[in-house]
Amino acid sequence: MKAPKHQKKAVKVTLHGHSWSVYPLKCRDKAVFRVFHRINGERRAKNFTTLGKAKADPRSILKDIHKQGRSTIHLTDDEKRDWHAAVTVLQQSGIRSSFETIIRHYTDLAATAGGEELLTDIVRKQVAARKRALTPIKLADLRAAYLAALKKKERSERYIDAQSSHTGQFTNHVGDVMSDKITREKVQGFIDSKKGVDPRTKRNLLEAIKAMMKFGKSHRSVRADWDEAEHVVVPTVKSKKVSTFTAEELKKLFAAAPAKFEPILAVAAFAGIRSSEIEALVWKHIRLLEQDPKDKIIKLDDDVTEESSKRSVEIHDTLCGWLTGPFKVQGKLWTGSHDEFYRMK
């Protein structure tokens, strides 16, 4: 009998992550399908007359291996020991996933980690690093540190007062809570509790909370990925109609205003500067003594505008006339309190 020759490419039988080859052969012009087994360390062949029978043989063995985790054939001694050890670990851990699933997870994690180091060691290091990186503190302490940082940066008194008020309201609302426990629900509940408050104020309250929590992230008191406030719903701020005073109305305002409020009215009326900026202005920002009229400006630095951009406003003759009398070399333009300023308005 002539030795059979391989006629076609081997057919793979795959089950539970394992594969077995079936070899289609020609023997005396008849199709033969051969499967190789390893019994007691020796490689032995089994022939079948149909491909279905040939595939059924290794499939039944693979099912047996997967079900019982052992077999007296087909596995070397080292492979048997590895199999039994792996199955024992799974049983002790209470994991019910198949051995194939566990291996797939492990290989994916190993590839992601970029090495063969024990993955539990990598996870432990990451957990330890996160614990060292994040040190939650009481929200009240975070607020105090935030306000102290604003003063150290010499932000305007007006801005600090606003941040103190807004963050103080939020801290009182949520109570004695740690900085890493601020959720979207807590922030949303605070915003919703402000009945009768206009949309602009609600948005300002939210922005103050976000600024405080951003400070907390930079000092590792808040998670670096904290974005709870980004999902809070606030009413849409509708643009207000700008009203313009006539010359006669301005005359009446100046006539009724106290002398110390006249330069405030002048800057607001003839320079178009916002109230919060006027309250933060100091006389050094007002360059009134320059010889060239083009150099006479009000210089608004970032400590006045509270914005990233600076700007300057020209002092024309009318405004110059109102500022010349009360002009001082130093000191604040408005020397009264914040509450008094808005009562005057």
Image: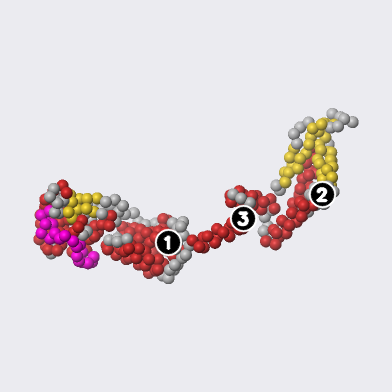
Looking at the picture, which amino acid does disc 2 mark?
Ile
Number of marks in the rendered image: 3
Residue 21 spot, x, y in % from top left: 76, 40
In the picture, the quarter occupied by the C terminus is bottom left
Residue 219 disc label: 1
Question: How is the structure coloured here?
Answer: secondary structure
Give the mark nearest the N terminus, 1 or 3.
3
Give the mark nearest the N terminus, 1 or 2.
2
In this picture, which residue range is highlighted in magenta? 320-341
The answer to whether marks 1 and 3 mark residues whose Cβ atoms lie closer than 8 Å is no
Residue at the bottom extreme, as displayed: 176
Q: Nearer the viewer, residue 155 or 48?
A: 155
Looking at the picture, which amino acid does disc 1 mark?
His
Determine the residue positioned at 35% across, 60% down. Answer: 208
Determine the residue positioned at 64% across, 49% down. Answer: 107
Residue at the right extreme, as displayed: 1
- Residue 195 visible in the current orientation: no
Pointer 2 residue:
73
Determine the residue positioned at 69% across, 58% down. Answer: 90
Inter-mark Cα distance, 1 to 3: 30 Å
Residue at the top extreme, as displayed: 29
Give the quarter of the image for residue 234: bottom left
Residue 135 spot, x, y in % from top left: 47, 65
Determine the residue positioned at 18% across, 64% down. Answer: 344
**Local crowd at mark 2 within 10 Å, few (<14), some, or many (≥20)?**
some
Frontmost of labels 2 and 3 is 3
- Residue 230 visible in the current orientation: yes
Pointer 3 residue:
119
Instruction: Assign a secondary structure to mark 2.
Output: loop
